[in-house]
Amino acid sequence: MSDPVRLQLLKQIGSADHVEGLRSLRDQVHEQMEALLPTRPVEQFNEQLNEVHDAVIHRSVVLAEAEMARLGKGSPPVPYAYLLFGSGGRKEQTLSSDQDSGVVYQDPVADPAEVKNYFKELCELVVFHLQKVGYPPCEGNVLSSNPDWCLSLTEWGAKLNHWFEEPAWEAVRYLLIIADGRCIYGDSRLLDELKDLFFTDMLNHQIIIQRMLDNTMRHKVLLGFFGQLLKEQYGEDAGSLDIKYGAYIPMVNAIRLLAVQVGIRETSTLERIKMLVKAGKMSKEDAAVYDQAFRIFLRLRLMTTEQNDDGLYANNGKLSSRKLTKEMTDELKSGLRLGKKLQRAVFKQTMGRLT
């Protein structure tokens, strides 16, 4: 997609006045970007693709606000920030992406129940709009329409405290989700305040680092003891490679843990690597090889199987090994060896801090 075409599409997305128009534009983008993947540098492709996702999601919130006004519900009663988590928060979405979202709104001075109800209805509309545009809700129900993920700043503070003080597996998972949070619409200062609470709690609950390490090390890279690629054994994906959970996620998790331990607020993995160097927590040499490995994983993840189920774009993160050339296979193996090295380094470094 040439720059003039892309800019024109972004302009059309930004002025779309109904969800059906947004869907048509997203379909165009999907088709055109898919054709460009083999020819573009991966970072440029990823940046441009996520710019489009951001524009579509942003416009969906605007349309939901307008619909609330048409329904006689008025404007947002207090400032708020619409947040993206997961790959959306990290600016690493593939062509197909689900919804991982939340809302933080300013503490109301009056009628808290009324304010809460407004945002409940608004978020239900946003989630519905995004489904119509092709974004399925995330399976874990981390959605702005879920009351647990649509809270005032004070309510968020209480929830974070609870998660930090009782760090069960699920609570730790939620905290790591918050670490990836990014404001896509609204008052970003509210997210800044939420992150202030998060990092203050991190300092006051050092035991959480051990729990986060356990979570971080859960997914192993898909490289066997003898250096062979570990393929899916059963089902319709037998013979394929789980690029998402066997290459991409282990690296995302490892870099994120290093970043949150030193208060880095950037959410994209490549930006976190740069900031770790700046903070003196990673050598330039290590950063260069991890950066390169991550770009390989990003490109392969963008090549994984695309599906369209009932109008919803979906991606299972698996890649047929037949799609890989010998050069790509060698690059993947090299990247996975670095992924293993990174996991070992993170384990050693984190355990060193705890002893």
Image (cartoon, rainbow, N blue to C red):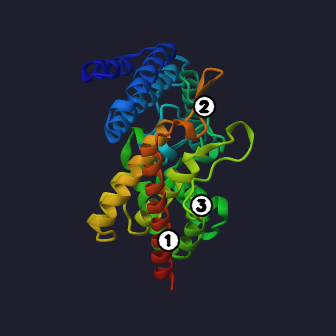
Q: Quadrant of residue 285?
A: bottom left
Q: Residue at x 61, y 38 (%)?
A: 316
Which numbered circle lies on residue 136? 2
The disc labelled 2 sits on which kind of residue?
Pro
Q: Nearer the viewer, residue 115 or 263?
A: 263
Residue type of the residue flagged with mark 1: Arg
The x, y position of residue 80, in whole percent, is 45, 41
x then y, percent, for residue 185: 41, 36
Q: Residue furthest right?
A: 235
Name the foreground residue: 350 vs 182: 350
**Which kind of residue does numbered mark 3 sit on?**
Gly
Would you call the spot at circle 1 few (<14 residues within 10 Å), some (14-19), or many (20 or more)? some
Left or right of 67 on screen, residue 41 = left
Q: Nearer the viewer, mark 3 or mark 1?
A: 3
Residue position marked by numbered label 1 in the rendering:
344
| Image spot of residue 210 (x, y percent) | 56, 73
First-in-chain label (2 vs 3): 2
**How many other residues sit within 10 Å of disc 2, few (<14), some (14-19) or many (≥20)?**
many
- Judge whether 238 appears above or below 200 on screen: above
Tell us which disc is closer to us: 2 or 3. Answer: 3
**Residue 162 locus on image (x, y percent):** 61, 64
| Vertical position of residue 138 compared to residue 215: above or below | above
Residue contact at pointers 1 and 2, CB within 8 angstroms: no
Mark 1 or mark 2, which has the lower sequence index? 2
User: Residue 291, relative to residue 144: is it above or below?
Assistant: below
Question: Helix, strand or loop at disc 3?
Answer: loop
For the N terminus, the quadrant is: top left
Q: Nearer the N terminus, badge 3 or badge 1? A: 3
Give the CA distance from mark 3 to mark 1: 15 Å
- For label 3, the residue is 224
The image's mark for residue 310 is: none
